[in-house]
Image: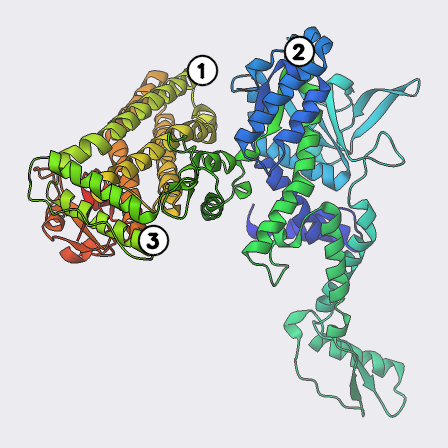
Amino acid sequence: MPIFGLFEVLQEIHEQQKDKLRLPFMQSPFVFAGIDKIAKTISSIPLKFLRNEAFRVSSFRSEFKEIYYNTQEPPHVKSEKVQKALEGLIKRAPRECLKYEIKAQNGVEEVINHPLIDVFDRPNPIMTRCQLWYHTVAWLLNDGQMFWVFNRNRAKEIVEIWPKPRWGFEPVLEAKRLKKWKFHANNSDNDRNLDSQFHGEEFDLDEIVRFYKMHPQQALDGMSPLVPAKSFVSQMFFASIFNESFFQNGAEPGWLLLADESIPLEKKEEILASMMRRHGGGPRNASKPAILDEGLKPHEVPSHKDMQFIKQMEWSRDVILSVLGVPKAIIGGLEQDVNRATFEAAKKAFFEITIIPELVYFSDLMYSEIFRPVDPTLFAVFDLAQVEGLRANLQELANAARDLSSAGFSRNELNCRLDMGFEDAEWGNEAFGNGALVPYSQLLNAKPSSVVAEEQAERLEQQQQQEPATGSPNPPEPPEGDNPDGDQRMFIRQFQSFAIRRNLKALNWRQYAEKTLDPNEARLKRDLLRFQKELADEQFEKLRKNDKAFNRRDIEAILFELGEATQRLEPTARAAAQRSAESGFESLRSDLGGVFVFGLTNPAVFAAVETSVQRVQGILKQTRDALRSQLAEGIRRKETLDQVTARFTAVFSFERTRAQTIARTETAQVVSATRHAAFETEGVERKLWLTAGDERVRSNHRVFGQLGAQLLDFNFMNSVGQSGILLHPSDPNGPAAEVINCRCVAVAAE
């Protein structure tokens, strides 16, 4: 519809509803803003389907929801609590468990293949999952009641879900008990055409789901949250009508024309008509000059500024948002002093007070009306783990980890409690203290620092004597003095300096590659190829199921679901990045002789891991975009199934060839970022670029390798007169031409 045609329709609707408050959702901006925000938020949260025999027991379902929808605890803690709840259920209700044959040891498994999952993904021919939930929430909040109507196949399986508003439904009672719901299509042509399949039909209670807000006086009706705020909605509406009338009446306040003598009626009408012709007709005629005769004198009435009802409208707005449960900071543009902290607090309160109770209600209702009659072991929840806004950001986790680490918590405890997603380390069960990564268990019986330094020097000297003479410098002498802590720090510096000089005497890129790069690169490549094969098999299966003539409406249904595939790839990408970070950490032993301050809880390590995970996951979008492009081209050319399959095969073949590049680049980036962060933390002042020394080394990298030792913050791109930042090999911030497939390494130097 042309934009001007749209405005004409809106104007017609406005004229029909003028001076009457009929549809708050359409006539009140803050009613719309509040309901829209809640509906969009809920519709954006994906559903997760779970199975366990214990879901048959209402007490377990209640306990499970309380655990699952707790936003204060990470997923692994919730899993442990759910497992304990299962075991506790068997202990306290053996008869009930025997009746349903509950097996707690199986835990709660996620269901990814079920007919109802397909129904919720595509509830009917004109709606997506998000649209289904948006309509549901918007109608429920605006009207207080709405319905889902099912279409079933011959096997009585649900194949379509149609959301419907409250109007059109009336209860059918028998002996004062609800038996059915009868539907009447709306009077408008559009609604009648769309609802003709249901017009006049009576639905049994198992063919319909009723969503409603409790009405204190009508058991078979719902009450909108806006009902208690009706007066405030009306006040805001009529205030806006008043202000609109002001602009329609000339966009200026009214004037009084005063005369010294009485003027005949005909003359009055002539003067008024003349003034209206010149100054009436809306804002375009505002501020035109006027010439008065007949002894007339103008007198201005109070200005419009005194009639704007600003405070009243603000109060009405606050009441509307309050009854809907939407903080002003969430709507945006209403708070002048909103900062990051207040917004995050408002967002958290919005979820805990408004969104999550609605999600619990929907989960209960779906189980009672949909899942239990079909499969009582199946339960659906909204997957809050996929809500980005509920996750702590990386810097918050890093700060919390640092503070808790200094309080005596071990690396593995922090990883578990803060849900960082790292694999547990063998050494991670030990708590470290005093900033030098010394286990607390050792500090209980610690020796004086001078004695420890002397023992370390003796061990290093013995090792030096056992090795062939290489001209290496002698190890540092153990410190002496009355300042043990200062002596310890000085000795660490001397010890690291000795290790750096010793390492520079025997630089060996091949040894570094074989121990650090190659194993992680090979494993990530293998994992990526396996994942791509599984994804390709699933994609080809979906393609074969749509063996009818393709059309553009089928494209999204045929392609793999991006969010689900991204979620499946995340553990693989995260595990690979964590292994690379740990390998980079271990490689520092040869460079620095050990690590004294730096640890894997360093924020730079977290950032490197998270960035790598996001890059690997981003590959899936590129794959899906390529498949979409090929499918669209195949549809345009009216190709057969075999021809489209060949196009898909070419896309996945290309992705397999990229696995090597992705694995090498991601491994090197995490390893190199970890090493560079360690150099900064440990106080290393200089670095040296080391290449593989073969014919595949880039020309720029040969130049970098010939520069010798440079300051740690030196930008290598400056040495070749090119733009960009490259602080170390495989720098994620560096130009792609210098980073992709890079095998170089930076080593500590003096």
- Which comes sooner in the sequence, label 1 or label 2? 2
- Residue toward you, 246 or 727: 727
- Which comes sooner in the sequence, label 3 or label 2? 2
Residue at x 66% of width, y 41% of height: 352
Across and down, in percent, residue 614 comes to: 39, 38
Across and down, in percent, residue 522 comes to: 25, 26
Please state, as top left, top right, bottom left or bottom right, where the N terminus lies in the image. top right
The amino acid type of the residue labelled 1 equals Lys
Is residue 593 visible to us here? no
Residue at x 19% of width, y 38% of height: 743
Is residue 279 visible to us here? yes
Task: Establish if 399 lies above or below 185.
Answer: below
Question: Residue tagged by mark 1?
Answer: 545
The amino acid type of the residue labelled 2 equals Lys
- Residue toward you, 107 or 526: 107
Q: Which mark is residue 156?
A: 2
Tag nearer the camera, 3 or 1: 3
Q: Which mark is residue 484?
A: 3
Residue at x 12% of width, y 52% of height: 708
